[in-house]
Image (tube, rainbow, N blue to C red):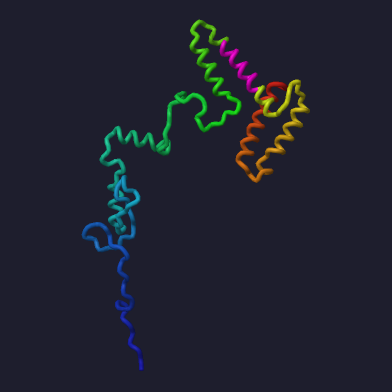
């Protein structure tokens, strides 16, 4: 008995689309998403290819915004929506910056004193304050190293190696406190080298 050939039209029924196009009156499949508005970028319309192309060509992110609002939005986008301030508006470190040598606290007082004096002695006072700050930083660095002058390069280097070995984060399992202590030691070492040997 011979089998009759199967008509190709009836061989495989087309599957209905998983999602219908959101364009009114369209029975096509909604395979392509498009944001509903600039305020709802996480919610989508689902369109067929023809209607998503039409939607995208008519899309305007800034629709309904004034020129000033568009300009403000563009300015915020240039800094990834993060706050900014003018150069010089923030003096010294913020509250989260560690200042173990009190350089900024002493520096701010010295700068204000120099500016407040309008009789020409401000520059001399600034130079004196700079020398005082340098001496203060040197004294604090000596305290970190627990050393007293006179200082030799050999003595300083030996003490530095001992402190690095003692406080290195790798010796403490990556401890953050040890890392911060090592930063202070490195800064103190740089200060003492610059003060005594350059």
Task: Tell me where residue 102 sits by quadrant.
Answer: top right
For residue 24, side relative to residue 154 (left or right): left
> Could you tell me residue 132's position as x and y percent?
62, 16
Judging depth in this view, the residue of 130 and 75 nearest the camera is 130
Seen at 31% across and 60% down, the residue is 30
For residue 123, side relative to residue 68 (left or right): right
Seen at 52% across and 16% down, the residue is 111
Seen at 50% across and 13% down, the residue is 115
Please say whether residue 183 is one of the residues in the magenta stretch. Answer: no
Residue at the far bottom in the pictured view: 1
Residue at the far left in the pictured view: 25
Q: How many marks?
A: 0
Q: Is residue 150 above or below residue 183?
A: above
Judging depth in this view, the residue of 113 and 37 nearest the camera is 113
Q: Magenta: predominant secondary structure element?
A: helix
Q: Is residue 78 above or below residue 25?
A: above
Which corner quadrant holds the C terminus?
Answer: top right
For residue 170, side relative to residue 66 (left or right): right
Task: Tell me where residue 144 sits by quadrant.
Answer: top right
Judging depth in this view, the residue of 5 and 55 nearest the camera is 55
> Could you tell me residue 71's position as x and y percent?
33, 33
Q: Is residue 86 above or below residue 65?
A: above
Task: Tell me where residue 170 sits by quadrant.
Answer: top right
> Could you tell me residue 142's position as x and y percent?
69, 25
Which corner quadrant holds the N terminus?
Answer: bottom left
Residue at the far top in the pictured view: 119
Q: Which residues are magenta?
A: 125-137
Seen at 30% across and 59% down, the residue is 48
Judging depth in this view, the residue of 104 and 120 nearest the camera is 104
> Could you tell me residue 40's position as x and y percent?
32, 48
């Amino acid at each position: 008995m011979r089998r009759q050939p199967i008509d190709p039209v009836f061989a495989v029924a087309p599957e209905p689309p998983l999602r219908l196009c959101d364009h009114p009156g369209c029975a096509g499949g909604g395979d392509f998403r498009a944001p509903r508005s600039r305020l709802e970028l996480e919610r989508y319309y689902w369109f067929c290819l023809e209607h998503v192309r039409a939607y995208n060509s008519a899309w305007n992110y800034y629709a309904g915004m004034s020129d000033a609002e568009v300009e403000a939005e563009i300015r915020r986008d240039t800094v990834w929506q993060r706050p900014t301030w003018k150069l010089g508006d923030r003096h010294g470190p913020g509250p989260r910056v560690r200042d173990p040598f009190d350089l900024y606290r002493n520096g701010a007082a010295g700068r204000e004193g120099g500016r407040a004096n309008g009789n020409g002695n401000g520059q001399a006072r600034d130079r004196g304050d700079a020398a005082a700050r340098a001496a203060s930083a040197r004294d604090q660095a000596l305290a970190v190293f627990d050393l007293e002058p006179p200082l030799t390069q050999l003595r300083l280097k030996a003490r530095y190696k001992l402190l690095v070995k003692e406080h290195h984060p790798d010796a403490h399992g990556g401890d953050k406190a040890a890392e911060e202590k090592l930063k202070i030691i490195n800064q103190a070492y740089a200060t003492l080298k610059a003060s005594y040997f350059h």
